[in-house]
Image (cartoon, helix red, strand yellow):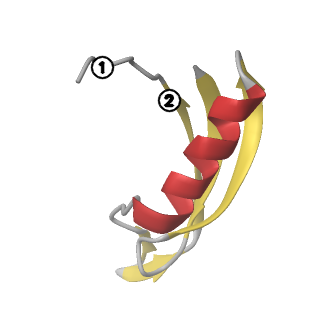
Amino acid sequence: MAKVRVLIGTDGRVKQVELVSTDSPGFFEATKRRALAKWRFKPATRGGVPEESWKEMTVRFEIRNG
């Protein structure tokens, strides 16, 4: 498990990932790479205009067979 803060850009892409806490530093690095490459969010808005915002979230991993 890793608790991270992500900076969500005006386009909904993750611009930055910061570690808050983790059970496994290796898992955090994998999470960071995936977040920067693939995660997408609806950007925050102020007055109808998209703006960057930070979001804190917990990421859990599961081991799958196959």
Counting from the top left corner in percent of width and height, residue 15 is at 62, 70
Q: Quadrant for the C terminus, please.
A: top left
- Would you say the residues marked 2 and 1 are in contact, meaning their CB atoms lie under 8 Å apart? no
Helix, strand or loop at label 2? It is strand
Q: Which residue is mark 2?
A: 59
Q: Is residue 40 above or below residue 6?
A: below
Taking 40 as reference, is 4 left or right?
Answer: right
Residues packed near mark 2 inside 10 Å, few (<14), some (14 to 19) or many (20 plus): few
* Residue under the image location 46 percent in, 71 percent down: 13
Gap between marks 2 and 1, in whole Å? 16 Å
* Residue under the image location 50 percent in, 29 percent down: 59
Counting from the top left corner in percent of width and height, residue 54 is at 61, 54
* Residue under the image location 57 percent in, 19 percent down: 1
Q: Give the residue at the far left of this rendering.
A: 66
Taking 62 as reference, is 29 left or right?
Answer: right
Q: Which residue is mark 1?
A: 64
Q: Nearer the viewer, residue 64 or 19?
A: 64
Q: Nearer the viewer, residue 41 or 27?
A: 27
Q: Is residue 31 above or below residue 65?
A: below
Residue 41 numbered mark, or none: none
Q: Amino acid at mark 2?
A: Val
Image quarter of residue 43: bottom left
Helix, strand or loop at label 1? It is loop
Counting from the top left corner in percent of width and height, residue 35 is at 51, 55
Counting from the top left corner in percent of width and height, residue 55 is at 56, 47
* Residue under the image location 40 percent in, 62 percent down: 38
